[in-house]
Amino acid sequence: MTLRRILTVDADMAVLKQVSTPVETVDDDLRVLMDDMLETMYAAPGIGLAAIQIGVAKRVIVMDLAKTDEPPAPRYFINPEILWASEDTGPWEEGCLSVPDIYEDVDRPLEVRLRYLDYNGNLVEEDADELYAVCIQHEMDHLNGVLFIDHLSRLKRERAVSKVKKAARADA
Ligand code: NI
């Protein structure tokens, strides 16, 4: 497995805005990509990562929502779709490895029904709520070139991006 560089909004906005394309075949090459993504996500550390965040415009997501005292529980989503979303929405504080150190409330449906292919290419349908629902919607946004800060007011979004740019300059 290989650690990959996570793209961030200060330098890589144009790539992060790309719409990712569906996966046609779930094969070993794709599993290598998913293994790399998971390792990169764990190292960050983060709880979800979309392929475009390492510069690969494919509709692939990895996630692990296990708490620190629980064993790892990696999840893999290929070509995910939302079949149904609840009318009830609620705010949840979100962050993103591509927008480091920025945390803001985003309103989203609290429950969704999902369809996706798993690590082995099997078709899965399941319901998600709470953190799982929030996280999968956040990650699926990435597949469409949408960042969580795009759900904020223009002022808050611009402030977030300039904070990340400033921090990147300070690190350089
Ligand atoms: Ni994100």
Image (cartoon, rainbow, N blue to C red):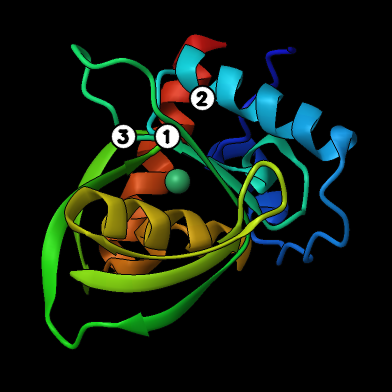
* Labels 2, 3: front one: 3
Q: Residues within 10 Å of mark 2 (few under 14, many from 20)?
A: many
Q: Residue 148 at x, y = what percent?
A: 38, 57
Which residue is labeled 1 in the image?
164
What SS does tag 1 mark?
helix
Query: Of marks 2 and 3, which one's residue comes earlier in the chain?
Result: 2
Is 54 on the left-hand or right-hand side of 97? Answer: right
Label 1–label 2 contact, CB within 8 A: no
Calculate the distance from the C-alpha at mark 2 to the C-alpha at mark 3. Answer: 12 Å
Q: Residue 48 at x, y = what percent?
A: 44, 38
* Labels 1, 2: front one: 2
Kindly tell me whether residue 142 is visible in this rendering.
yes
Residue type, label 1: Val
Calculate the distance from the C-alpha at mark 1 to the C-alpha at mark 2. Answer: 19 Å
Could you tell me which residue is drawn at 42 percent across and 34 percent down? 164
Residue type, label 3: Leu
Which residue is labeled 3 in the image?
65
Is 5 on the left-hand or right-hand side of 8? Answer: right
Could you tell me which residue is drawn at 46 percent across and 58 percent down? 147
Kindly tell me whether residue 146 is visible in this rendering.
no
